Amino acid sequence: MKYISVAEAAQKWHVSERSVRNYCAQGRVQGAKLQGGTWGLPETAAKPQRANKNKQNERSLLTILREEKASKYSGGIYHKTQIELTYNSNHMEGSRLTHEQTRYIFETNTIGVENEVLNVDDVIETANHFRCVDLLIDKAKAALSEKLIKELHFILKTGTSDARKEWFAVGAYKKLPNEVGGMDTALPEEVSEKIQSLLAKYNAKKNKTFEDILDFHVQFERIHPFQDGNGRVGRLIMFKECLKYNIVPFIIEDKLKLLYYRGLKEWGKENGYLMDTCLAAQNRYKAYLDYFRIAY
């Protein structure tokens, strides 16, 4: 019998290497052998199914998020998602609010600080990001469109100092050329056509895969349609699309930032960098779902 490595199985099953090791350690991969601290898996081994995979009477994650949002339930997966997604996505873009301050704003709609100076934009964009998460939950099943993308940007940037700049277009595509990571992006006059083309290609696919969602994200970030806020809008879109297609969503934590940026840069040449980073983030979100006893 031919055996494959953990890395090969992870690539074959589209999961992280950590998940493969867990499957083996739990005895869920028939014929897997541990030799010298390394697992070997039969080449023909099938990806294990979730042990409690009986979904007939189980509510989807989206249903639960909507129920908890509507009831203003505190301490559940909606509450956790709002804080983790908002804190990490904003922090990656330079917000200096702490995780605790982000949580406090969400839970109390107030700010409590002592002997500290806060950036007003950080506070406004945190509150705005909470509203963006609500929007993507409400419209998770809607087709991805220019209107929805612009609406997310409008909500995110409304009331900020950027919104008072004549050259900054809140809820509209950029007016001035910009770059990201030292690389050129689409010129302002090219943005609309490129976004429409990207959406047409993406929406033409009936059933989106994890990789399809990542590919859209990369192309969106390379176009960089807005003057600022592209990363946060792009990550919100990924979360929405995962919910729509019953894919476990993920939150890129600030500690994964460098790996995430590397993955964006290398996509098309080596997709594994971004894929592995997002699968690791997905495993983290699965841990949240396990804690709240939500099936996936």
Image: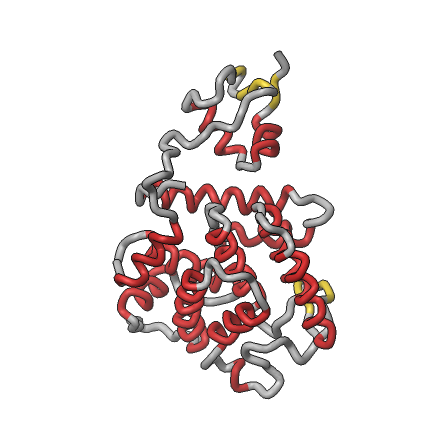
Residue 258 position in % (x across, y down): 58, 52
Q: Position of residue 201 (x, y in %)?
A: 68, 57
Position of 265 compared to 111: left or right?
right
Residue at (29% x, 73% y) in the render? 110
Position of 103 with respect to 197 (left or right) is left
Residue at 57% x, 48% y is 207
> Which residue is at the front of the view, 23 or 90?
23
On screen, residue 203 above or below 194: above
* Quarter that holds the N terminus: top right
* Left/right of residue 46 with respect to residue 130 in the rendered view: right
Say if residue 105 shows up in the picture.
yes
Instruction: Report the quarter where the C terminus lies.
Output: top left
Q: Residue at x 45, y 30 (%)?
A: 49
Residue 128, position as x, y percentages in the image: 42, 72
Q: Residue furthest top?
A: 1
**Looking at the picture, does residue 25 appear above or below residue 247?**
above
The colour scheme applied to this rendered structure is: secondary structure
Closer to the camera, 157 or 65? 65
Residue 250 drawn above or below residue 184: above
Q: Is residue 114 visible?
A: no
